[in-house]
Amino acid sequence: MKKLLILILTALFVLPTTAQHYRHMEGNDRYYRAGQGNYFGLRLGLNIASISSGNLDLDADAYAGLFLSGVYGVQLSYRAPLWMEFGLAYSEKGGVSRIDGYDVKYRLGYMQIPIVCKYNIDVSNFRIQPFLGGFLSVGVTGKTKNYHTRVSRSSYDIFKRFDGGVRLGCGAEYQMIYLEAGIDISLANISKDDFDTAHSRCIFINAGVNF
């Protein structure tokens, strides 16, 4: 995992020097990218996730995980700075619960499809991009560790594999460097127990490049 992260970080620094440059559209002071305003991007970041539930055994505090994504942005109009961004991501969520004085760690690894609408605001040499949309996820990895019983099992014995909800936040772009922060709020009940409800929450901070 450490070697993978080093490789990804190296790629994030190298790509801006090799990817295509911006071009200025004649008669307009807003920068648009070549290719009719569309773009590709890479994102690497950190999730701070938790699980909210009325069942205290499932109610879990913050858990740190990896977020890795590729995105594709489509400009919706040349008359308004509005984009639709589609992504395919690996997103680690879950949480840490305290039961009988011992930690229980829920790890949920998802393949996630985030789809957001972004509005561009030019501020000097920066572009501020608030966004709002949603996400759909399917669990592909996951393990629950009970440090009292010393037993590990699949997290999907407890939680459903499918999740979905609202995604909102704000990004900032300088030339080809991109930073963003936001939150995923699950609207789906991911508990497998018919008598319980559980919803994931996730604050994320990502860095990357657009080209």
Image (cartoon, rainbow, N blue to C red):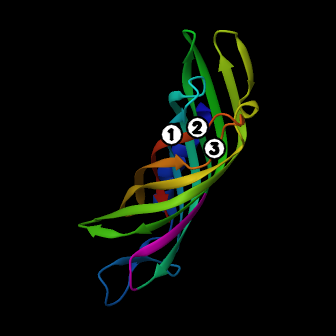
Q: Amino acid at mark 1?
A: Asn
Estimate the x, y position of residue 139 in percent, counting from the top left.
70, 43
Q: CA distance from mark 3 to mark 1?
A: 20 Å
Estimate the x, y position of residue 99 in percent, counting from the top left.
58, 15
**Closer to the N terminus: mark 2 or mark 1?**
1
Q: Amino acid at mark 3?
A: Asn
- Left or right of 202? Residue 124 is left
- Left or right of 86? Residue 77 is left
- Residue drawn at (38%, 56%), measured in percent from left and top? 170
- Please tell me in which quadrant of the rendered image residue 168 appears: bottom left
- Residue drawn at (56%, 40%), measured in percent from left and top? 200
Q: Which residue is mark 1?
A: 47
Q: Amino acid at mark 2?
A: Lys
In the image, residue 174 above or below residue 163: below
CB of mark 3 within 8 Å of CB of mark 2? no
Observer-side mark, 3 or 1, equals 3
Q: Which residue is mark 3?
A: 189
Mark 2: which secondary structure? strand
- Residue drawn at (54%, 9%), measured in percent from left and top? 101
Q: Residue 8 in magenta? A: no
Mark 1: which secondary structure? strand
Q: CA distance from mark 3 to mark 2?
A: 15 Å
In the image, residue 3 above or below residue 171: above
Q: Which residue is mark 2?
A: 93
Residue farthest left in this picture: 124
Q: Residues within 10 Å of mark 1 (few under 14, many from 20)?
A: many
CB of mark 2 within 8 Å of CB of mark 1? yes
Q: Which residues are magenta?
A: 79-87
- Please tell me in which quadrant of the rendered image residue 30 appears: bottom left
- Left or right of 57? Residue 162 is right
Q: Residue 86 in magenta? A: yes
**Closer to the N terminus: mark 3 or mark 1?**
1
